[in-house]
Image: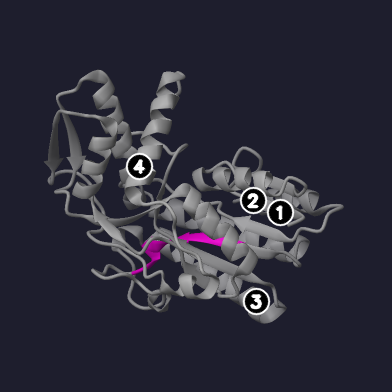
Amino acid sequence: MRSAIVAGSTGFIGAHLAARLRRDFPDARILGCGSRDVDLTNRDAAFAWFERAAAGAEIDHVFHLAALYKAGDWPVHHPATQFFANLSINVNVLEAWARFAPGAKLTSVVSYCMYPPKETPHPESELWGAEPEDYLFAYAFSKKGLLVGQRAYRQEHGLESTSLVLPTIFGPGDSFAENSHVVGALIGKFVRAARDGAAEVEVWGDGEQRREFLFVEDAVDGILAAALHANADVLNLGTGQAHSVRELAEMIREASGFRGAVRYEPHNRFVGVRHRALDVSRVKREIGWTAKTGTKAGIEATVRSYREQLARGGGE
């Protein structure tokens, strides 16, 4: 790798990816494009940034992780905001890639919320079947639009790209606020409760919701492996295993050392879809990639990191 752009480099996964690229390819030119650098919803601003980035250097990889997304029930109340922002980001990144770095391979990250509700793991062939969960339709279809755009550029102009469907990602550097996604929110709750000697921790839902979780370092490993070796247009990237929120909470409780009560709140709280997991047989078959870090080990590492963050006076 000689030169790469990371769109979304200040986001959770993007920051880890940019750091890994700089570590693994010390002689490469790694250009991060975060929300503080440029508004990618603005076509002129996006084009100007990509043109400067590509000036005097041949870009061989573009990683597209830029998106507007917030956990919890925010997508329920802001579907139009989310849809049009992500549609604009995707169109602008695709056009800028095609115009200023057409020789680069584009590797994008999308979410498994694109799949319809189902009790068993989703293979890639189900992406274009039934509709996704209603409360996530705007985000899901903006991501499906990205896949369509990549396919269109591949068919008309021969541009090379791969999309990776990821489950819930967690790890050091995540958001541990109460309104974060389920892993970050629960780690924050349990670690702070253990520190403060709280009597109980509340968990939203009945605990039977099932999700797939992937440690962020494994996600970065998979993104890099796909960028360098994958030829498929889309690949699921995950563990292929779902855990209930109750199982997750118990793993976090144990790692945090919390000894109080755990109270599940099945009413008046937004909990999202009941079950979601990925079939990862294709990525294993095509590029030989598998996740290395189990959910329990990843949680233990993340709890340690968050404790260190709090000890340094970092935000809660």
**For the point 26% across and 54% down, which residue is it?**
272
**For the point 24% across and 36% down, which residue is it?**
254
Q: Earlier in the sequence, mark 3 or mark 4?
A: 3
Residue at the limit of the structure toward the bottom, as seen here: 155
Do the numbered discs 2 and 1 sit on residues whose CB atoms are within 8 Å? yes
Q: Nearer the viewer, residue 238 or 147?
A: 238
Check residue 299 in the rendering and tell me which mark sits there, or answer none.
4
Do the numbered discs 2 and 3 sit on residues whose CB atoms are within 8 Å? no
Are there few (<14), some (14-19), or many (20+) residues within 10 Å of tag 3?
some
- Amino acid type indicated by mark 2: Val
Q: CA distance from mark 2 to mark 4?
A: 26 Å
- Amino acid type indicated by mark 3: Arg
Residue 265: image x %, image y %? 13, 42
Q: Earlier in the sequence, mark 2 or mark 3?
A: 2
Do the numbered discs 1 and 3 sit on residues whose CB atoms are within 8 Å? no
Q: Nearer the viewer, residue 114 or 309?
A: 309
Are there few (<14), some (14-19), or many (20+) residues within 10 Å of tag 2?
many
Residue range corresponding to the magenta coloring: 107-115
Secondary structure type for disc 4: helix
| Quadrant housing residue 35 | top right
Instruction: From the image, tell me which residue sits under label 3.
Output: 154
Q: CA distance from mark 4 to mark 1?
A: 30 Å
Instruction: From the image, tell me which residue sits under label 2.
Output: 6
**For the point 71% across and 46% down, which residue is it?**
31
Q: CA distance from mark 3 to mark 4?
A: 39 Å
User: Is residue 110 inside the magenta stretch?
Assistant: yes
Look at discs 1 and 3 and give the one toward the viewer. Answer: 1
Instruction: From the image, tell me which residue sits under label 1.
Output: 4
Q: Is 126 left, or right, of 272 in this rendering?
A: right
